[in-house]
Every structure is written in C-alpha cells, then in structure tokens.
Amino acid sequence: MKLLTKDKLHYWGHSLLHPFDGFFEIRFRNQGSMLIATLLLVAYAVLRCLSYQYTGFPMNMNNIDEMDALSIFISTISVVVLGAVSNWTITTLFNGKGKLKDIYIVICYSLTVLIIGDAIVTFASNFVTTEEIMILTSLQMLCYAYFVFLLIAGLGTVHEYSFAGNLASMVMTVVAAAVILFIGVLLFTMLERMFSFVTSVAEELMRRLQ
Amino acid sequence: MMKRITALMLAALLILSCGVSFAADGTSNVYQGYTFDFFGNIKSTPAAFTLSQIINSDSLGSNYVFGTVSDVCTASDGRIFVVDSNPDASRVFVFNADGSLATVCTPEGVEIARMNPIGTIKMPHKDADKAAQGRTANVTVDANGNYDPTSKTTTSLKGCEGVFFHEKANELYIADTGNNRIVVLDGTTFLFKRFIYRPDNMTGTTEFKPSKIVVDNADRIYVVVQSSYEGIIELNEDGSFSRYFGVNEPTVNLLDFFWKSIATDAQKEKMGKTYAPAFSNVALDGEGFVMAVTSDSASADKVFRLNFAGANVLREMGNTLVVGDIRSDKPSAFTDIAVKPYGTYAVLDKTNGRIFLYNFDGELLTVFGSLGNIAGQFRTPTGIAWLGDKLVVADRGLKCVYIFEPTAFGQALLDACEDYYDGNWEEATAHFEEVLRLCGNLETAYTGIGKNLLMQEEYEEAMRYFKLGNNREFYSRAYKGYRTIVMKENFGIIAVIAVAAIGAVLWSEVAYHRKQRRLSK
C-alpha cells in the first residue's frame, strides 16, 4: 500500500475548506494519511519552539534564557496524543464510529490552521510596535476559532454524532484527559517511591556486606 | 585519620573564605541588595547603602534612654527629630546631622526639645495667653479668667507617635497621640506655639488620635489616625476640619462576594465587615503630592500618591508593581515612606525588614535590609526619612536609629534618578553607565540609558538597551523610529515590490477570467 497518494494529499486540503465532506471521505473512504498527520504534528511542535524564541520582542513575554525546546516539543505532542486517546476512550463508550486513527488524523489536520496562523504571527511580530500587536492577536484568535470549528466538524463527522452529542463528548474528553493525567502522575510517584525503596535497600545491603 | 583532619580543615577554610568573599568592598553582606527582573526573578545587586552611624541610648548622655522609638523626621539643615512614644515619658529628641544631641537651640529650647525628664513642654508667657483661650490644659487661670504671667506653665506629652518638621513656617508638629491633639513648637527655639485639638466641625466616626502628620506648602495639615478606614484627615491652616482624604479601597474576594450574596442578614451580621484598609504613614513628595503607605494586606495598592481629589496617581511604569516583595511568602507591610524632592522614594517594610527603593516612575531600583540582631539589621522598623542622600531609619524593637549612607553604587543610582528627573540626560546616562559598571542586573538602568538614546534618535542602540532592560513599550517606540528610517531609505525597493505584488494579483485575476471565458465559449 502506498503511504501517500495524490488523493490523500488532495483530501488534506479539501478537509480544511470543506470539513464535513472532507472528513467524511477520510473516515469512510479511507482517504486520511497517518504520514501527513504525523508530519503536521511534528511541524506544529517545532513551530511552537520557534515561536517561543523568535516571536518579536514587543510581543514575546517568554524568558528566552530559560527556554527548554525539548519540553515545549514533547508537551505539545503529548497534549495532542492525550486529546486523541481520551476522545477515543469516551467515544468508544458512547457509540462513536471513529477509530483512534481517524481521531488522530482529524486533530492533526486541523492543526494546519494553527501552523499557518502561528507562522504568520511569529514572522510578522518582528515588524510591529505594541499598538499593532492587537492586529496579530486578533488574527491568532481567528485561527484558534477556525481550529475549534474544524475539530467540532471533524469529530462530529467521524463519530456520526449530533451537534449536542458531539459537544457533550468533547466535554467528557476533557474530563477523561484529566483522569488519565491523574493516573499518570500517580503511577510516576509510585514508581519513584518504589525505585527509591529498592535503591535504599540495596545501599543498606552493600554497607552491611562491607 | 590524618586525611580526615586535612579534609575538615579544607572545608573550614572553604567556608571561611566564602564568608570573606561575600563581604566585598568592605561592606557587610547584611546589605547585599536585590531587585526583580521583568519575569519576577530575583537578581542580586551590590549594597546600595551601608551603616554609617547608630544613634541609641548611648548618644543621649546619662540623663535619658530611648523607650519606644516610633518615628523619625529630618529638617533640610540636617537636624534629625526622633519621637519616643514611651507612655511614661514621651519625648522628641533633636539631633544634629552628625548624630549628637542638638545644642544649637537656646538653653531653654534645648530643655524643651528634650521634653525634659518628665516629658513636659515649657510654655513662654505670651503663648500661654493663646493657649488659655482654647481648651488647653494646665494653664493656671484665676477667677477672672486671667493667668499669672510670671508663672511658667507646663504640659506633658503622652504616647506621641509622629513628628513633622514644617520647613516653610519653621515649625515642629508633634502628634500627641495619647492626648488626642497636635502640639506645634517653634522650629528653632522649640518654644510652644499652639495646640490643635479635634475640630468642632469634624464629621465621621474616626477618633482624633493623630499618629502621623504632614503639612504641605499651603499649610494644610494631613493627619493619619491608625486603623481609621475613613482616610487621612485634612485640616485647614487654622486647625478646622476640611475633609477626609484619599479613601483606600479594599480588595473584594470573589468567594466572599458569593457567600455574602447568598447569606441571610443574620449571617451577614456575624461575618466580618470588609473595611477600607487604613493608611499607616504619609509623606510629601517634591511636587506637593501626598504619598501614603498601608501595611494592610487587604489593600489592592500598597503605596499611594494622592492627587488633590484623593485619587491614587502613583506611577507604576516599572517591570513590577509597587508592592514590595513579590517572591516572598509574607507580603510586604509598609510602615513608612520617605520621598526625595526628585520623586525617588524608599518604603520601609516591617515583615521582612526591607527597604525598597523606587524611582519616580515606580521602577524598582534595589532592595536591602533584613531582620536580625546584627548592627544594621532591624527588629521592628517604624520610621524612615532622607537626610540628604543618607537614609535615617528608626527601629522600635532595637531602640535605636540607624543612619545609612549610600555606597558608590547607591550614590550613582540616586544621582542618575535625580538627573533623569531634572532632564539632564547626559549626566543621567553617565550615572546609569556607572550603575551598570557596578551591577549589570539592573533593568531600570538599561532603560534609563535607552531613553536618552531614544531622545537623541539613535534608535538601533536604544532598541538594544530597551531589550536589555526588558522594556517592551519603549522598545517599540524606538522600533517605530527605526522602522520609519529603514522604510525611507529603502523606499525604492519596497515600492517596487509592492507594485509588483499588486500587479501580480491583478494579472492573475485577469488571466483567470480570460481562461474562464474561453472555457465557457
């Protein structure tokens, strides 16, 4: 099977401008591409790092001396993955037709808007004064609004939900994400304690044996 | 064994040498200062002030000891007035600039200045006449309403909390808190002039217990009463009541608001009322504005610059707000403020024993001071005043008054602020450069230099300095100028690109429509 066909590339663009139609094709005629989706996600994560550092000074409220590109990159990716997984866990319980792959593709394709918006804002912010920042922030807001619209349209289409059901599932997704985070933190703390217990026992043994 | 001893000695040496290296340029690490950057991080600065002199009971001679040192003020000729609010023997001590008990007054005046051992004011006869007409105490009057002009009359001070030297009229105002009145003395001889009692036309529920006083150049008297939520009492020159001034606003907690909105009247009765935070001290700035501080943590603002209408017009243009510590668990509680004629002010925080130095724009310069028992540290700091470029700080807990003198760093800071305020840009820049030579952490100094460069239209260099000073607003002002110049210089290229872009769009439109028309045929 070819990873990337001309059709799949076409439906990436098509789904951004005609989300209901486009995401229907992706879900039910197998026109989505994991490759494009993953590339978009990586591109977005890289762009987050770039905009942290290269947003123009008047608009950039970040302390560049304390920048940690790796953590920005990983946290961006993990938020998307967490969103996809928690949406999947909820929708499988509530008769959603979408597979994990479809959800992932919907989210990542929607990111295209943010990539375009952030790139423009990051670039243009190097040529503005504080009074003109407002223009850029409103552009950014527009992009976020369109991103949310794409998400709602895409997820509603792949799960075959009504509008209200779709919104409810998204709210539940947030709850599920919180639960997953909580369990994750719990697991890490437990592991850490176990690890420190084992190391201290080992240390004790070593000292006794000496 | 030998190895261990060597290691121990090495460790001891290391620790000792650390201690020595901390006390750089002969100053104690007690005064190592810090400041905050744009991101709220603590950045260290060198000591801005060092202890130059301590005035304590030893400086008073054998006759007196300090009881409760509760306020300090200075005159422009260098005299220092210290209030002892000891309830048994309240006194106002007058010191010369060198810290010796004042001897410049007349012999009688000296006696009055010290308030003598039992804390009394001696009244000269002619003034006792005036006093006898009012509700003054302790004036012997005969049956006909006349008093014996040969008798010397005395009255005592009780629990004084504040003192103010009024330069214009050469008068010393003493807040005689325990006696609910203000005592006015002559500024040179310290002979009694008049009392100011609770005005008859005073409204409100505030008790007239003057704690801190200032008198402005129009002779209006501003009186702070501790824990009064009605504001500062403003009196006219003749001592009549004018108004309450500068009512402070409490912050309302959203959660409290919610509970109060659903509570019944009976429940509301039991809840604590949210009062407007009280002012703890006042001062006058060089432009005649009243500056006040509050130690109440419920107050939204901590430092006030009150205009005539009583609104807070404090400039907060710095990278942090004027609230004192932003990285401490315990919020700052300001007890006093001292303002230079050029607007640079020092506020005294009693929770952490800190002195915060802000310039006219509200930009934090440096923070120093700490709580402790070493000379120069504070226990319960109560009052602060400028003595030239020196700072005088009274401490109630340690029963002493410290005089701090600026270090090279502190002097450069003050000079820079003064020249900047006066508009001497060149000198200010030179001082700021000196500041930066001694401390590269101070964003205010970078901004100061940047502003001078901006004025000279050296935009690129100004941008560099504003970036270092993390000042986004001024950076973009400089950038605006820079951008205009670049646009002008490269107008040809930019115009060609713009025309080409518009042309390309038009051409593509035309071509598209032609194609459509051809297809439809």
Image (cartoon, rainbow, N blue to C red):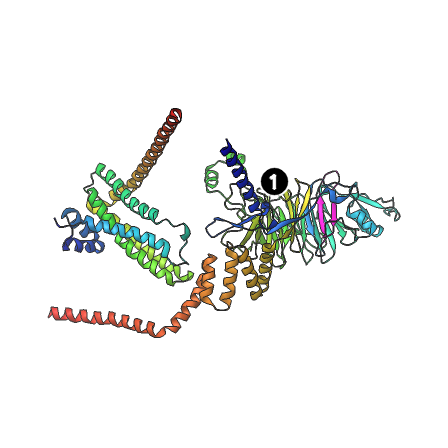
- As rendered, which of B406 and B337 lies closer to the eye? B406
Q: Position of residue A117 (x, y in %)?
A: 30, 56
- As rendered, which of A111 and B377 lies closer to the eye? B377
Residue pushed farthest left?
B521
Instruction: State left or right for residue B252 relative to residue A83.
Output: right
Q: Quadrant of residue B509?
A: bottom left
- As rendered, which of A84 and B471 lies closer to the eye? B471
Q: Position of residue B368 (x, y in %)?
A: 58, 48
Residue pushed farthest bottom?
B492
Residue pushed farthest top?
A208
Indicate whether residue B90 is drawn in magenta: yes
Indicate whether residue B3 is drawn in magenta: no
Q: Position of residue B338 (x, y in %)?
A: 63, 52
Instruction: State left or right for residue B292 relative to residue B238.
Output: left
- Circle 1 residue: B372
Kindly identify the residue that appears in the image at 18 percent across and 49 percent down. Answer: A33
In the rendered image, is residue B358 in sight?
A: yes
Quarter of the figure with the C terminus of chain B? bottom left
Kindly identify the residue that appears in the image at 40 percent across and 67 percent down. Answer: B483
At label 1, the amino acid type is Gly
Q: Position of residue A172 (x, y in %)?
A: 29, 40
Q: Is residue A174 above or below residue A119?
A: above
Q: Quadrant of residue B16?
A: top right
Secondary structure, mark 1, is loop
The residue segment tinted magenta is B78-97
Kindly identify the residue that appears in the image at 52 percent across and 39 percent down. Answer: B10
Mark 1 — on which chain does it sit?
B
